[in-house]
């Protein structure tokens, strides 16, 4: 067992876990049990068969056999369970609450847990466990866009240089590393992708190297529709840093550039437009680093095969971290050359009859969908829709008018917002539909040579509403032709 003050305190407290079927809380439950935390109560709004179904959906990164095995382990844990109608009963008796990161989105938990938090109840999280307990150097990456790609690029660069690296992502397909904490050593690295929601619980500690890729309007419906509040949440990743730590910031983004003025750690910026004294920048076609105290041409921008300028920004951010960690240029080059991108993030699926198909399903904001559209010089056929997050869609509507050959629009508040703007700018080249498979068939039938089909929703819950349970999915359908 790990001997650490934070864990020793948890071993003496009543711990309540909210959302046991989720990937994060099930991992926390198993970890705390192994580490000798005995007084635990698990809550979940689902019960019986619905709990099992919810568990499987939350563990998409596992094979079916692995899901069955993981579920058996969770069911075997010696926990008191308060599921279904008993959800959150006795939660006020807790001394520490570990909620799933989206707890405030659900009316069943929002009011009760918000009240407990306002009364001073201690909240824990998977991210807090990583930061508090890891003996390895922690590199934490957050940002509105690009955090997943940057996280995996950093890990790839460190691995190419021969370092031992642990990685924990923030999407349903990620495998967590809590069970590896006991094995980690001081000369190793733990790379974390950290979301806005994970930062809404005070972590008590910051990463040794903290990266903020960018901050643009997103999740404003979770922040009282206040961008400043959302930006402060992102900035809180830096809260506990000290002089011996490093802060990596995007100097092309107005908000993150301002974070540099209040950073306590050494700042290493990155920019595709500005020549930086202490950072990583693009000079003509060369990616040049001065993060480690000397100017050094690391690689050429032409060596980056990922589409879009924002992916170039992700590479610059990863290079900054790599140079801070004294990774050699050859390892950086090899990592960039072999990196094929992330699933559902501007992912190239196939070229068929001269038409290229890209899956950008994880673009759930207008800004990220606009960046995706602007990444290509081919005529774009866009598939979009879903639920808006309290942000403005005018800029995306303008980009669609000028850059999109045809739009297929699915129902939801994204469609409502876009159509209002389309009326103002006189754009009408879109088709409304709610049948994903039929949409894709018609898109394929009408697409011309050199067209590019882009699934980039620009809103949340597209997959759960229009693909899951109703469709084989974008990748499977495109590859079946």
Image (spheres, rainbow, N blue to C red):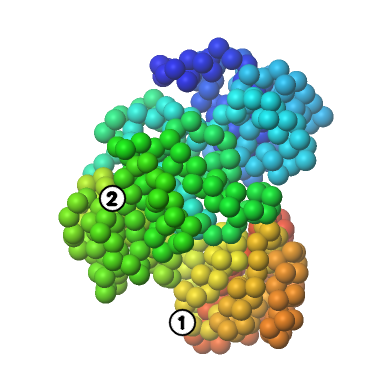
**For this view, does 438 lie left or right of residue 261?**
right
Question: Label 1's element?
Answer: loop
Label 2–label 1 contact, CB within 8 A: no
Q: Residue at x 65, y 62 (%)?
A: 391
The quadrant of the image that shows the N terminus is: top left
Q: Nearer the viewer, residue 132 or 440?
A: 132
**For this view, does 422 lie left or right of residue 254?**
right
The quadrant of the image that shows the C terminus is: bottom right
**For this view, does 220 lie left or right of residue 340?**
right
Query: For the residues marked 2 and 1, what is the alpha-carbon distance in whole angstroms?
Result: 31 Å
Question: Label 2's element?
Answer: helix
Q: Residue at x 49, y 66 (%)?
A: 346
For disc 2, the marked residue is 322
Where does residue 42 sit, x and y in percent of width and height?
Answer: 67, 25
Where does residue 422 sit, x and y in percent of width and height?
Answer: 71, 79
- Is disc 2 surrounded by few (<14), some (14 to 19) or many (20+) residues within 10 Å? many
For the question of whether residue 189 can be seen, the reply is: no
Along the polypeptide, which appears first: circle 2 or circle 1? 2
Residue 373 sits above or below residue 366 on the image: below
For disc 1, the marked residue is 377
Q: Residue at x 41, y 64 (%)?
A: 252
Q: Nearer the viewer, residue 70 or 416?
A: 416
- Is disc 1 surrounded by few (<14), some (14 to 19) or many (20+) residues within 10 Å? few
Where does residue 155 sit, x and y in percent of width and height?
Answer: 35, 48
């Amino acid at each position: 067992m790990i001997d650490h003050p934070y864990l020793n305190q948890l071993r003496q407290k009543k711990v309540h876990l909210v959302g046991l079927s989720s990937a994060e809380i099930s991992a926390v439950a198993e970890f705390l049990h192994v580490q000798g935390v005995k007084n635990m109560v698990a809550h979940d709004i689902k019960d019986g068969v619905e709990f099992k179904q919810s568990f499987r959906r939350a563990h998409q990164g596992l094979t079916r056999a692995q899901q069955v095995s993981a579920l058996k382990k969770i069911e075997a844990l010696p926990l008191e369970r308060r599921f279904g109608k008993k959800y959150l009963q006795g939660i006020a008796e807790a001394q520490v609450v570990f909620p799933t990161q989206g707890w405030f989105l659900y009316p069943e938990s929002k009011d009760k847990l918000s009240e407990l938090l306002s009364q001073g109840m201690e909240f824990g999280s998977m991210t807090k466990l990583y930061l508090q307990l890891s003996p390895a150097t922690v590199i934490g990456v957050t940002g509105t866009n690009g955090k997943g790609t940057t996280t995996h690029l950093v890990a790839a660069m460190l691995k190419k240089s021969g370092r031992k690296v642990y990685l924990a992502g923030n999407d349903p397909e990620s495998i967590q590393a809590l069970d590896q904490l006991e094995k980690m050593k001081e000369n190793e690295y733990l790379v974390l992708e950290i979301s806005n929601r994970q930062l809404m619980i005070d972590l008590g500690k910051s990463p040794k190297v903290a990266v903020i890729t960018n901050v643009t309007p997103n999740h404003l419906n979770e922040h009282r529709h206040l961008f400043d509040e959302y930006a402060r949440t992102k900035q809180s990743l830096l809260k506990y840093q000290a002089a011996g730590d490093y802060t990596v910031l995007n100097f092309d983004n107005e908000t993150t550039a301002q974070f540099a003025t209040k950073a306590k750690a050494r700042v290493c910026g990155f920019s595709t437009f500005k020549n930086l004294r202490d950072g990583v920048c693009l000079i003509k076609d060369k990616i040049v680093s001065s993060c480690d105290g000397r100017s050094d041409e690391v690689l050429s921008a032409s060596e980056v095969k990922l589409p879009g300028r924002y992916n170039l920004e992700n590479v610059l951010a990863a290079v900054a971290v790599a140079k801070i960690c004294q990774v050699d240029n050859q390892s950086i080059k090899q990592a960039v050359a072999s990196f094929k991108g992330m699933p559902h993030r501007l992912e190239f699926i196939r070229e068929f009859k001269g038409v290229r198909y890209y899956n950008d399903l994880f673009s759930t904001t207008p800004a990220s969908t606009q960046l995706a559209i602007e990444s290509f010089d081919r005529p774009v056929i866009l598939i979009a829709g879903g639920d808006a997050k309290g942000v403005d869609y005018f800029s995306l509507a303008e980009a669609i008018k000028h850059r999109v050959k045809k739009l297929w629009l699915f129902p939801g508040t994204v469609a409502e917002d876009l159509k209002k703007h389309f009326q103002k700018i006189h754009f009408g080249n879109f088709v409304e539909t709610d049948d994903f498979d039929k949409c894709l068939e018609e898109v394929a039938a009408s697409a011309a040579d050199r067209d590019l089909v882009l699934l980039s929703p620009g809103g949340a819950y597209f997959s759960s509403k229009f693909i899951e349970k109703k469709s084989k999915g974008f990748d499977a359908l495109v590859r079946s032709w």
